[in-house]
Image (cartoon, rainbow, N blue to C red):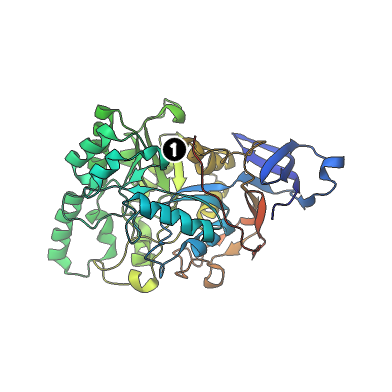
Amino acid sequence: MNQSIVIKNVNIVNEGQIKSTDVFIQNGFIEKIGNLSGEITKNAEIIDGTGKYLFPGIIDGQVHFREPGLTHKGDLRTESRAAVSGGTTSFIDMPNTVPNVLTTEIIDEKFRIASEKSWANYSFFLGVNNDNLDKVLQMDTSQFIGVSDDGLYFTKKGNLLADSPDTMGKLFSNCKSIIAIHSEMEQVIEENEEIYRAKYGEDVPIACHPLIRSGEGCYQSTKRAIAITEKHKARLHILHLTTEAETHLFRNDIPLKEKNITTEVSVQNLWFSDKDYQRLGTLIKWNPAIKTEQDRVGLLRALLDDRIDIITTDHAPHTLEEKQKPYFQSMSGAPMVQHSLYIMLELYRQGLITLEKIAEKMCHNVAILYGIEKRGFIREGYFADLTLVDLNSPWTVAKENILYKCGWSPLEGQTFQSKVTHTFVNGNLVYKNGTFSEFIPGQRLEFN
Ligand SMILES: O=C1C[C@@H](C(=O)O)NC(=O)N1
């Protein structure tokens, strides 16, 4: 359904600058940027961007959209629809679906389902664990965005990738693609669980979560992963950092393109801290756990000084019933993909980050880090994945406007000052002021 569209007099937030200009979209791509008039705009739909801000579409580097196998929590259609309403136009999905994504057949099946159901552009991590490691090492992994162990907790003690130096050594010395790790030491967690179970039984107070899944467990794991990476000259990406201490293990004195060790923070770790456990209970139970206020501030600082490279969500929907159980039974993770840009824009309003930095960490750097072709920037010849934002349009998160299949958010009751008014995916205006277009599937992300 590609239209010709001109967004007039808009402030484009791109590559470290904010510039007022016009943007011409045609045949799925950004055709021209500049002051446009006459012939070029004659047959185009005009959108007045006066006073608004145009970002490259957000690329979320870490989501769990739950399909196949866990579709009572979310699916590729519902969660990608929620994503585009919040300005996210591309996503990378993790391998802990059912079945786990441990073979090329399953990853191909996910691509097939996404091509029929996803509103946004997509790619998938191949899962890696002890069971498929030898096979993965024989595959041409250049066809995948990367390999990851995130959420693959089904094997027993010591078998988690990030907890098994032998497995890691084997993988890191052979794998050519990016290896994205969930970095917590299972052994530390299990020891802490025993201590707290002995004290409280099954119903451990949620405030103990960051003491069980402790900062020390994260730090030790990340430190070890970095040492193994350096030994084998591999390509490591540490997923969702949660502690200030870990941020000091990363460098900011080399350009992102040249880094072989990168990392990210998920928005909830810039927003919530341990002071929120009392109010929100297990709703904000995540793995790794949300830590202290000092960690939250330290993560933001590391984001601003480029030790942290990108912002993701780790969007991980579960039903309310699955969440509201005693500590050991309650699921970890919460939905976030619809609200990630709003959180960052609120931090901008609090004077904690610039709009340019938001575009860098949520768009440009994700494209650079994963080598995503022609997305993540507002440039002529690039895909027209664009998000138009009104910075002065307050609204409140409530059940009626939550689009996740699970139907809840830990942000309910939160008022945000900014609103996404238009989202373009591949040049199609798919979302406008609360209304969606007819369904137009997103595209498979290509890599360079
Ligand atoms: O790594 C993960 C996995 C995720 C999930 O629910 O899939 N939930 C989490 O809290 N962390």
Q: Nearer the viewer, residue 361 or 442?
A: 442
Quadrant for ligand 1 reads bottom left
Q: Secondary structure at mark 1?
A: loop
Image quarter (top left, top right, bottom left or bottom right) of the N terminus? bottom right
Q: Is residue 430 above or below residue 378?
A: below
Give coordinates of residue 324: x percent, y percent.
33, 72
- Residue at 51% of width from left, 45% of height from top? 445
Q: Is residue 374 left or right of residue 147?
A: right
Give coordinates of residue 17: x percent, y percent.
63, 34
Q: Is residue 9 above or below residue 99?
A: above
Q: Which residue is mark 1?
A: 309
Give coordinates of residue 400: x percent, y percent.
56, 72
- Residue at 44% of width from left, 69% of height from top? 406
Binning the other alpha carbons within 10 Å of mark 1 as few (below 14), some (14 to 19) or many (20 upward) gives many
| Disc 1: residue Cβ within 8 A of ligand 1's nearest atom | no
Q: Residue furthest right?
A: 38
* Kind of residue at disc 1: Asp
- Residue at 47% of width from left, 68% of height from top? 405
Q: Nearer the viewer, residue 110 or 277?
A: 110
* Quarter of the figure with residue 141: top left
Q: Is residue 164 above or below residue 420?
A: above
Query: Does residue 350 appear in this view?
Result: no
